[in-house]
Amino acid sequence: MKVKRGAKDFEEISVLQKELLAAAIDLVNAQSKTGGYIVYSTCSLSVEENEAVVQHALNTRNVELVSFSSAVNFGVEGMTKYRERRFHPSMNNCRRYYPHVHNMDGFFVAKFKKTSNTIPERVKKHRSKGKEEVTHWGEDKWTPEMMETVADIKEPGAAQDAAPKNKKERKKAKRQLVLAARAAVSTSVGAAAAAAAGVPAAALEVKKEEPKAAGNVEETAAASPKKGKAKRKSMEGKAPAEAAAPAADAQQAEASPEAASKKKRRKSA
């Protein structure tokens, strides 16, 4: 069931619930054998009906909030501050249950322990108040311009993903920072030493060889067998010529004495 309620309705309900809770506390005996406990629970998530009512009980009665996490170990802690309001630090013992988180109807639960049966004559004041200026968003703020504006809402879990989740990831991130710092120091020291020695910074850079193109590699591979065949042919052509050269020299050597004797005979005749 959906009900439209305004700020005035929340204030009226809050006053009624403060009176009901005060009456319930007055009926409990602080020296009871069961301990004198009071449980305050609502099926609402509004601060006016929950933390504000609990704070009023802490200020007007001798009670204190106690934890019940041993019996109910889930839920979100109660708010210690909301907009301009500031509540007692023990409000974290309360529990909130959200429909979109716990898959159930919205609830608020607080557990009190009565410390004394006397009612304080003066209301306890909570000194911690917010000093920042807060804009109250009532129905007068629901203008057409405001309703048409787009709200910038961060994705859920973005902050949690940015931070390391466990001890192992924190150590790993710390190790990476240490290595990065060492690398930065080594590069700065190397550059300073090179500058002191007069070595230009360009000489410190190592040029990488460019990989050869696939086409050039294939061309060289295809050309290599042709070169081998050409060398073989030249060697085969040179071998008979070199073998014929000594035979020609020998024939000339044999023919030379006969030619000399013939010339002598002709002269003598």
Image (cartoon, grey):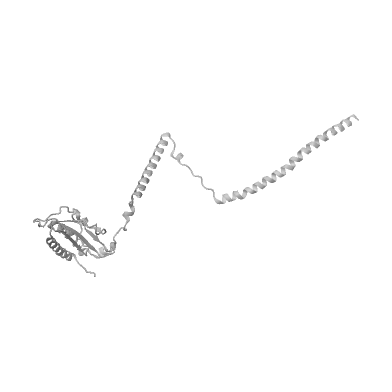
- Residue 121 at x, y = what percent? 8, 56
The residue positioned farthest toward the top in the image shown: 268
Quarter of the picture holding the C terminus: top right
| Among the 4 quarters of the image, the one containing residue 241 | top right
- Residue 178 at x, y = what percent? 36, 43
Number of labels in the image equals 0
- Residue 229 at x, y = what percent? 67, 47
Closest to the observer, 138 or 165: 165
With respect to residue 261, does 121 lie above or below?
below
The residue positioned farthest toward the left in the image shown: 121
The residue positioned farthest toward the front in the image shown: 33
Closest to the observer, 207 or 264: 207
| Among the 4 quarters of the image, the one containing residue 38 | bottom left
Left or right: 95, with 60 as reference point: right
- Residue 155 at x, y = what percent? 32, 58
With respect to residue 148, does 172 lie above or below?
above
Residue at position x 69%, y 44% in the image: 234
Residue at position x 59%, y 50% in the image: 219
Residue at position x 79%, y 36% in the image: 250
The residue positioned farthest toward the right in the image shown: 269
Quarter of the picture holding the N terminus: bottom left
Report whether residue 167 is seen: yes
Report whether residue 136 is seen: no
